Structures are given as C-alpha cells and as structure tokens.
C-alpha cells in the first residue's frame, strides 16, 4: 500500500518475485474507506507472463511481462499486507496496509472475469484449483491467532499481528 497525500485514495500493489532478479507487480488505486473486492491474476502463459488487477470484476491494470519460475509454498515466503521491506529485489512499501482483509484465495488456474465476479461475494469449498483459502475469521469467537486454510490443502497459518504477517510452515502471509 503506498502512502498517499490524498485523503481519498491509496495504491495497493501486488507483486511476485523469484527471489533473485525477476519481479513483476501491478498496482490498483483504491478509494479510502470503501470496501472493494480486489482480484489479481497471474497468467504464466509464455506469450503473456503478466499480472492483471481487477476491482469489482473490472480489469483496471496489468503488469509488464516477466518470466518467473514455480512457487513452492513449503520453502518460499508468502507475505500479505506485511508492510516490511523485502529483499532480492528490494520492495520498500511507503506505508503499511491499514484496512480490512476479508479473505485471501490462491488458485492454480487463471480465473475468468465471469468467475471473478461470481466468486467475489460467496464462500467457496475445497476444489482441485483452489490452492490456498484464508477466511481470516476462523475459528469464530476465539482469541487464537490460527488462520485456517479452507482450501482442503491443510496449509494453516498463524497470524502475527505485530509483525503483520501470517506464518504458513516456513512461509509468511
């Protein structure tokens, strides 16, 4: 999330890094104080190799084309709303994420615009294409920092509110 002199807008950036020199990112301008379903897709087709960003099912941004290898969660880091500087390549946020994150879903396929619109306001169940699904509201009524992976893959995490991250095995969200 970038710092903004504007009292009404801010910029949310999604990026993918290979951990070395390859990085791609896409940013979306958001209206402060408004809830918006945000979707980023990463099309790894060799002729495309880019991230697309959607607000409420409407395409609003795309990244440049960059080739990045496979992601392997058990040994790689996954950060969501971290507000931390990341190395190789460097990413230094202007400010930390200050807002509500209702859910995080990671699919092993590229969602179509129709799927993005259909899925943005409903809960989903385990499927072969859904690789990671955090609802950030479970277990209900407890003070635990557990974040349950509802994808059926068992990649549960632990919320680290002061370091602003969720731990998944070795990965952080």
Image (tube, rainbow, N blue to C red):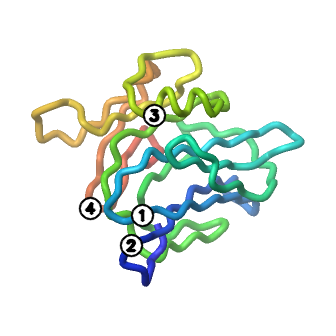
In contact (CB < 8 Å): disc 1 and disc 3: no
Of the numbered discs 4 and 2, the one sitting upstream in the chain is 2
Please, is residue 66 above or below residue 134 in the view? Answer: below
Closer to viewer: mark 4 or mark 3: 3
Question: What residue is at 57 percent from the left and 27 percent from the top?
Answer: 115
Q: Earlier in the sequence, mark 2 or mark 3?
A: 2
Q: Nearer the viewer, residue 131 or 41?
A: 41
Which residue is painted at 44% across and 23% down in the image? Answer: 151
**Counting residues from the N terminus, which is met first, the one under dot 1 or under dot 3?**
1
CA separation in Å, label 2 and label 1: 6 Å
Query: Which mark is nearer the camera, 2 or 3?
Result: 2
Mark 2 touches mark 1? (CB < 8 Å): yes
Q: Which residue is mark 1?
A: 31
Residue pictured at 30% horizontal, 39% vertical: 136
43 above or below 139? below
On the image, numbered disc 2 is attached to which residue? Answer: 8
Residue 123: x and y in percent read: 37, 25
Q: Nearer the viewer, residue 160 or 11?
A: 11
Do the residues bearing badges 2 and 3 touch, measured as CB atoms within 8 Å?
Answer: no
Q: Earlier in the sequence, mark 4 or mark 1?
A: 1
* For residue 10, side relative to residue 65 (left or right): left
Label 3: state its secondary structure: loop
Label located before the other in sequence (2 or 1):
2
Please name the residue that numbered disc 3 is placed on: 120
Q: Which residue is mark 4?
A: 162
The reply to whether the C-beta atoms of the residues labelled 4 and 3 are less than 8 Å apart is no
The numbered mark, 4 or 3, whose residue comes first in the sequence reads 3
Q: Which mark is residue 58?
A: none
């Amino acid at each position: 999330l970038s710092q903004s002199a504007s009292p009404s807008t801010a910029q949310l950036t999604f990026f993918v890094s290979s951990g070395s020199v390859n990085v791609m990112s896409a940013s979306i301008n958001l209206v402060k104080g408004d809830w918006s379903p945000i979707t980023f897709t990463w099309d790894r087709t060799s002729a495309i190799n880019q991230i697309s960003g959607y607000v409420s099912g409407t395409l609003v941004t795309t990244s440049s084309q960059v080739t990045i290898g496979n992601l392997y969660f058990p040994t790689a880091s996954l950060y969501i709303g971290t507000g931390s500087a990341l190395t190789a390549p460097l990413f230094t946020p202007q400010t930390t994420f200050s807002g509500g994150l209702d859910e995080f879903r990671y699919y092993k396929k590229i969602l179509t615009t129709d799927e993005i619109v259909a899925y943005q306001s409903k809960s989903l169940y385990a499927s072969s294409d859904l690789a990671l699904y955090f609802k950030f509201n479970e277990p209900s009524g407890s003070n635990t920092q557990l974040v349950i992976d509802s994808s059926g893959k068992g990649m549960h995490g632990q919320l680290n509110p002061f370091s602003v991250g969720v731990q998944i095995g070795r990965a952080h969200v």
